[in-house]
Amino acid sequence: DKKTSESIKRISQHLLKKPNGKVIFLVGAGISTSCGIPDFRTPGTGLYDNLAKLNLPFAEAVFDIDYFSENPKPFYTLAKELYPGNFEPSKFHYLLRLFQDKDRLQRVYTQNIDTLERSAGIKDEYIIEAHGSFAKNHCIECKKEYPLKVFKDKMLEGKEYARCKCKGLIKPNIVFFGENLPPKFFNSWEDDLDDMNEDHLVVVAGTSLAVYPFASLPIEVPSSVRRALINLEVVGDFKINPRKSDVVLECAIDEAAEQLARELGWNEELEKLIMD
Ligand code: OAD
């Protein structure tokens, strides 16, 4: 619609006028729903509405460290469904890749554990997996590290749980409620904040901004730096403390990717990346 195309124009104007300005993306589950991965909080289709079969005391218990230590079964069931490998990146993921290829990417802070940023070819140095991933595993008691295989084999068997020599449960380094985010998340954000100037752009996409500390990142963006939101609904600080300079795109993520690529004259390259 008209409002969307106006917002797209505002973003592309910013990017074209400030050719040295880099972009920081803050993303969540909404950038992967078009890949067939459900998000968490969309009523009806979101994961938390569809966990009845797991008999949880409350939906978020599936990612709660205390609950897991008593009953790892629900997480195992869900992990099997969410396990990366069966999904292809979205148009939006490939747009992020284009920002990298054009040297316009500062960082992608992702709450997602699907590793589709990596699948789209974004390099490790640009990616901050704020809520961890399946790649590394550790014992929740003695903290000993284990290779992925130990967890993965048990998950696929679906009978027993991966256990440490000390008998503690082994769990992927996905950040559960009650656990800290990786130090890299905080260090990198501090560095990026130091670097930020009015040429930069912070794009928040596909997240409800319901989970802290991630949800505080847009709040911390200096007022001299422009923020944009691409999401089906207006959320978080964009709703509570909107800034005059904010650009808000209330639309589907891939539609935004397509329109933005067109405005920037990047659409052929984007299509090529998707085809290859
Ligand atoms: P949510 O499910 O909370 O929010 C997803 C947001 O994306 C919602 O606002 C949707 O409206 C929007 N959305 C969905 N599909 C979209 C599309 N095609 N185009 C545009 N917007 C779309 O997911 P997150 O914010 O990522 O943590 O959730 C944050 C954290 O909560 C997750 O990392 C997870 C969860 O508990 C852990 O597992 C530790």
Image (tube, rainbow, N blue to C red):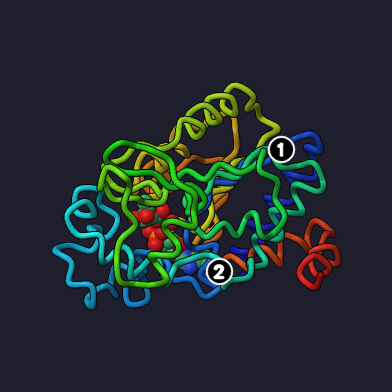
> Residue 133 location in percent, x, y?
48, 51
Residue carrying label 1: 22
258 is higher (above) or lower (below) than 28 = below
Badge 1 element: loop
Q: Which mark is residue 275?
A: none
Looking at this view, is 74 or 245 the one in front?
74
Residue drawn where x is 29% and y is 66% of the image: 160
Relative to 180, is 23 on the left or the right?
right
> Residue 73 location in percent, x, y?
25, 65
Relative to 212, is 148 on the left or the right?
right
52 is higher (above) or lower (below) than 9 = below
Badge 2 element: loop
> Can residue 204 be seen in this snapshot?
yes
88 is higher (above) or lower (below) than 187 = below
In the rendered view of the protein, which quadrant contains the N terminus?
bottom right
Quarter-wise, where is residue 42 in the image? Answer: bottom left
Q: CA distance from mark 1 to mark 2?
A: 23 Å
Farthest residue in the top direction?
Answer: 194
> Label 2 crowding class (10 Å Cα cut-off): few <14, some 14-19, many 20+?
some
> Residue 125 location in percent, x, y?
67, 38
Ligand 1 resides in the quarter of the picture at: bottom left
Amino acid type, label 1: Lys
> Can residue 235 be seen in this snapshot?
no
In the rendered view of the protein, which quadrant contains the C terminus?
bottom right
Indicate yes or no: mark 2 CB to ligand 1 under 8 Å.
yes
> Residue 250 location in percent, x, y?
51, 63
Between discs 1 and 2, the one toward the N terminus: 1
Residue carrying label 2: 252
